[in-house]
Every structure is written in structure tokens, then in C-alpha cells.
Amino acid sequence: MPSCGRPKGTSANVNRDPRSLDPLAFPLHQYVMLDTETTGLDPRTGARLLEIGMARVENDHVAEVFDTLVNPMQPIPPVITELTGLTDSDARTAPDLTGAMRRFEQWLEPDDIIIAHNAPFDMMFLDLAIREVTGNKKRFLPHLYVDTLRMSRLLHPERVHHSVVALIRAYGIGESEKHRALSDALQEEQVYRALRGEAFGVYR
């Protein structure tokens, strides 16, 4: 698919998060693709982490994956069960937030660059989880990240929809999301490769 022709590396950091990298500055070949599932959209109204999935990509190959459920310590809303298939019984046997975040931080390497679709959403929930677990309100996930939602909007401002499902259909990756963290992360990794190919001519 043709790119919109925007010069590489010229997008402004509209996010203002110092961890956010310009997605058009340079192509990445080693990174961690990340996706989360949550019990809702807004932690201020009680939404909690429900699942974390990651795929470590090295030299353009998925080298390792990580997936953990998180017990939200509250009933899973029916709309989330319908979307993800996850039930209260699934969550009941999952590690609590402390256990899940311990596994998460042990798996993630200090110099890993994270890529996610609508990355600020995932980073917000992970930052809040780290603060809750440590009791330190100033703690946050220090990793740099690239947002493929922002990348898609920069490359294709003419597109009406930039959701994961819209992009996987546009690039022939799939027809639907499973709304499970690891499977979505693997689809989103293919989305990044497609966008990277348009931006930099690197399709490997």
C-alpha cells in the first residue's frame, strides 16, 4: 500500500511523554511488542489490568513471548467477558497484581524498546500498576516506546479508521482481533512491520 509520502523523522512529539519515540525517525528491528487487556477504559473509574502479553523481536524474528493473566480482585464486567472470553474463574487462579508485575519486570530487559498500538493507554495502566505495587507515586515504567496508532495516523491521515482491526484487514493480516493480549500483540507486530515497510522501505 502506498505511503502518504511524509518525510521521515519530521513528526512532532505531540504526546509530550519523554518516553515516546518519533515512529518515523528510524526503523526498529529489535523491540518488544506489548498489549494489555483491562476490565475497562479508565482506571479512575476502577478499571484494572487483566492480562499482559509481549513478544520480543530480535532481528525481525519473534524470539520469545510472555503472557500472564492478572487477578483484578473484582468481578470482570460482562462486556469484557464477551469481548475477551475471560471469566471470573479464569481470573481467580491468576496471579495478583504484585505477582504479575514481578513477572513482567523480570522478563522485560532494561534497554527494551516497547511498541504498542495506542501505547499511552497500555503505559498508563502499567505505570499505575507499578505505583500501586511499590507504593511509590513517582514510579513509572522507564522504557522508551513507539505507538503504532500514531504511526498509522502520520503515514495515512486520509484513513478514517486506525484501529487494530482496521489495520489488520487493510494489510491482509487477519479479519478480527481475539482481544487476548498475546495474540493481539503478535498481530500488532505484523502491523508494525507493514507500517515500517511503508515508512522506510524495510519489509523484512
Image (tube, helix red, strand yellow):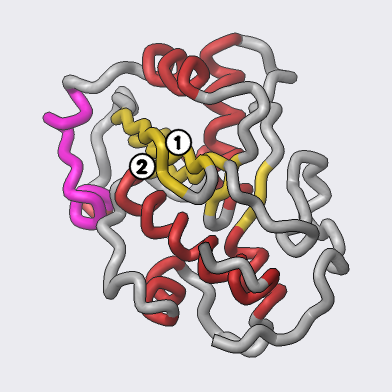
Q: Residue 8: percent from the left, percent from the top?
A: 81, 70
Question: Compared with residue 14, is residue 125 higher up or lower down, i.e. above or below?
Answer: above
* First-in-chain label (1 vs 2): 2
Q: Is residue 165 left or right of residue 121?
A: left
User: Which range of residues does the magenta coloring cover?
Assistant: 80-92
Mark 1 vs 2: CB contact within 8 A: yes
Q: Is residue 87 magenta?
A: yes
Rendered residue at 66%/64% (across/down): 150
Pick the front one: 16 or 82:
16
Rendered residue at 17%/33% (across/down): 88
Q: Is residue 90 magenta?
A: yes
Amino acid type assigned to the residue bearing label 1 in the image? Gly
Cα separation between marks 1 and 2: 8 Å
Rendered residue at 17%/20% (across/down): 93
Amino acid type assigned to the residue bearing label 2 in the image? Thr
Q: Secondary structure at mark 1?
A: loop
Q: Residue 163: percent from the left, percent from the top?
A: 47, 70
Q: Is residue 65 left or right of residue 104?
A: left
Question: Compared with residue 164, is residue 15 higher up or lower down, i.e. above or below?
Answer: above
Question: Compared with residue 100, is residue 65 higher up or lower down, i.e. above or below?
Answer: below
Q: What crowding class fits label 2: few (fewer than 14 Cα within 10 Å), some (14-19), or many (20 or more)?
A: many
Q: Quadrant of the N terminus?
A: bottom right
The residue indicated by pointer 2 is 39
Q: Residue 130: percent from the left, percent from the top?
A: 57, 20
